């Protein structure tokens, strides 16, 4: 591990830290750790720590048990007692953070200062409260009840939040670049974290502390703890919407009245690495959380959890790594501006067009739709893929099967606006736009041009990227540049697959038009 920002938590020996953490964990009342599993050093695989099976393990075996009292959260942290006013708030969190025990929500995000201008900018939420809790325990060093656990948490992260400008540049035209949100995170930490620590130094620092952290050091520490939460925290408020659905595992617990305690750090559960093909699952019980094997685990096999059907870009953004198994969930964003440009070209290319379309008037009509909040700026293109089965395995190939319904509906609305503007000024265009087949031609042709332009936004070709990836030893990217190339290549593959699908639809449409032309003459010959 890298050196910390202060000497409060000495790095020490990796194996020694691991052993101390294991001893601490197993000493917790109610905790268990199966005799045939081992916490090991996987840094040679760029996986930090992990858990492997030291002997064959049958399916449905309890691997370890985590008592709730061992979880670091508002309900167990002494900070909630010392600064109770910070923890009084709405029962529901202002942000739902991902749970490692089931599929994460698509909009799981730390809140930004712009999320709600009407709210008190200093108000805390489950995200910032957990950052404050971690900082409080961190600054108390060995006096913290969670010291052995905090000592094994990563001190360096490869999430894009910590990348240099040059490293981010390797992502090229990926939408991931805009989602990093470094400036927004800085503002949130300065407003809700640094300020609180500085105003309550007697609470956050032990009495014997001689030198306090500077504002910039607290900012760095806040980012580190925020990233630890992004990578490891569980949402303790997610309850089962369907108790019969084994894939939905919330921690069903009565909350402390009025306490904003929805997120927590779960020791040992977060030592499990994760992949899209997995063999273990975290179950939430009344008194504890348990890790259970989903199928037989072979000797030497790593025990893996599941973070959900995340794309390579999202996996990298949240957790700082990518895996080949998650590539089936890759996506690419297609901006409406590109689609609109393609549609305009298709309309302007209609046969018989006599006059220029007043695109300004079209835009005015579209603005009405935007004001009603029914207009998307971009669309996510993705493959269709089967969900993992009850044993954590996935079957079949992921395949691009079509455009998002929202995109088709928006194009339909847009073309209606074009037709309305054209009116009787250009009867040929108006009649063409009234034809369902022509509208489909415009949709397909416009989207195809948009996709081709979207791929052109990347500085390198897919073929060039694949050459880089082909030189990676072992096939799994581990460096920041390799992971960036992996992400952008995955997005380009989706674009290529989407273009191929659109072209196939165009060919079928052309064939249908040909058949329609032949049909009347065939009827005449029969007569």
Image (spheres, rainbow, N blue to C red):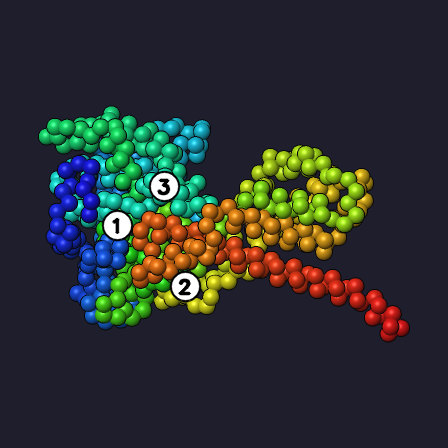
Question: Where residue 219 sits in the image (x, y, percent)?
Answer: 28, 33
Q: Is residue 430 above or below residue 216?
A: below
Along the line of sight, the residue nearer the viewer: 137 or 190: 190
Question: Where residue 80 sits in the image (x, y, percent)?
Answer: 25, 36
Quote the CA–CA distance across marks 1 and 3: 35 Å
Q: Do we see residue 89 in this rendering?
A: no
In primary-sequence order, the first of circles 3 and 2 is: 3
Q: Which residue is depicted at the point 32% across and 41% down?
A: 162
Residue 522 left/right relative to 249: right
In primary-sequence order, the first of circles 2 and 1 is: 1
Q: Which residue is depicted at the point 55% across and 57% down?
A: 498
In this view, the mark in front (3 or 2): 3
Q: Which residue in the structure is indicated by mark 3? A: 166
Q: Residue furthest top?
A: 199
Along the line of sight, the residue nearer the viewer: 427 or 148: 427
Q: Which residue is depicted at the point 34% across and 61% down?
A: 475
Q: Secondary structure at mark 3?
A: helix
Number of marks in the rendered image: 3
Residue 517 left/right relative to 174: right
Corner quadrant of residue 109? top left
Question: Where residue 420 sits in the image (x, y, percent)?
Answer: 74, 40
Question: Where residue 172 sits in the image (x, y, percent)?
Answer: 44, 45
Quote the CA–CA distance across marks 2 and 1: 24 Å
Cβ atoms under marks 2 and 1 closer than 8 Å: no
Q: Secondary structure at mark 2?
A: loop
Corner quadrant of residue 189? top left
Q: Which mark is residue 266?
A: 1
Q: Secondary structure at mark 1?
A: loop
In primary-sequence order, the first of circles 1 and 3 is: 3
Q: Which residue in the structure is indicated by mark 2? A: 388
């Amino acid at each position: 591990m890298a050196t910390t920002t202060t000497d409060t938590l000495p790095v020490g020996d990796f194996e020694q830290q691991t052993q101390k953490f294991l001893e601490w964990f197993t000493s917790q009342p109610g905790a268990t750790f199966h005799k045939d599993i081992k916490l090991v050093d996987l840094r040679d695989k760029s996986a930090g720590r992990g858990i492997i099976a030291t002997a064959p393990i049958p399916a449905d075996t309890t691997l370890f048990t985590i008592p709730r009292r061992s979880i670091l959260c508002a309900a167990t942290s002494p900070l909630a007692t010392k600064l109770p006013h910070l923890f009084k708030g709405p029962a529901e969190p202002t942000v739902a953070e991902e749970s490692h025990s089931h599929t994460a929500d698509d909009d799981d995000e730390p809140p930004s200062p712009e999320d709600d201008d009407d709210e008190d900018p200093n108000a805390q939420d489950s995200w910032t409260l957990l950052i404050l809790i971690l900082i409080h325990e961190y600054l108390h060093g060995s006096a913290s009840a969670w010291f052995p656990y905090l000592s094994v948490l990563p001190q360096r992260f490869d999430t894009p939040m910590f990348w240099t400008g040059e490293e981010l540049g390797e992502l090229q035209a990926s939408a991931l670049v805009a989602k990093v949100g470094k400036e927004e995170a800085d503002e949130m930490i300065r407003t809700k974290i640094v300020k609180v620590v500085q105003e309550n130094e007697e609470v956050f620092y032990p009495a014997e502390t001689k030198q306090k952290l500077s504002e910039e050091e607290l900012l760095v520490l806040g980012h580190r703890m925020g990233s630890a939460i992004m990578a490891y925290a569980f949402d303790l408020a997610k309850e089962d919407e369907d108790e019969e659905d084994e894939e939905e595992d919330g921690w069903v617990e009565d909350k402390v009245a009025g306490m904003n305690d929805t997120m927590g750090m779960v020791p040992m559960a977060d030592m499990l690495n994760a992949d899209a093909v997995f063999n273990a699952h975290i179950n939430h019980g009344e008194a504890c959380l348990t890790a259970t094997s989903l199928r037989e685990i072979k000797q030497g096999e790593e025990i893996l959890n599941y973070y959900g059907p995340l794309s390579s870009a999202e996996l990298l953004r949240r957790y700082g790594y990518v895996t080949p198994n998650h590539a089936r969930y890759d996506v690419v964003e297609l901006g409406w501006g590109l689609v609109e440009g393609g549609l305009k070209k298709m309309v302007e290319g209609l046969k018989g067009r006599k006059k220029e379309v007043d695109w300004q008037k079209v835009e005015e009509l579209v603005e009405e739709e935007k004001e009603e909040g029914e207009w998307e700026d971009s669309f996510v293109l993705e493959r269709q893929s089967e969900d993992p089965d009850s044993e954590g395995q996935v079957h079949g190939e992921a395949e691009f099967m079509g455009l998002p319904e929202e995109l088709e509906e928006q194009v339909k609305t847009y073309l209606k606006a074009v037709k309305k503007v054209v009116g009787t000024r250009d009867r040929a265009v108006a009649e063409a736009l009234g034809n369902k087949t022509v509208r489909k031609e415009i949709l397909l042709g416009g989207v195809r041009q948009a996709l081709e332009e979207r791929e052109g936004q990347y500085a390198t070709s897919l073929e060039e990227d694949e050459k880089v990836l082909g030189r990676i030893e072992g096939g799994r990217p581990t460096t920041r540049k390799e992971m960036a190339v992996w992400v952008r290549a995955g997005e380009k593959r989706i674009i290529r697959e989407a273009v191929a699908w659109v072209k196939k639809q165009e060919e079928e449409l052309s064939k249908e038009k040909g058949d329609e032309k032949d049909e009347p003459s065939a009827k005449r010959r029969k007569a």
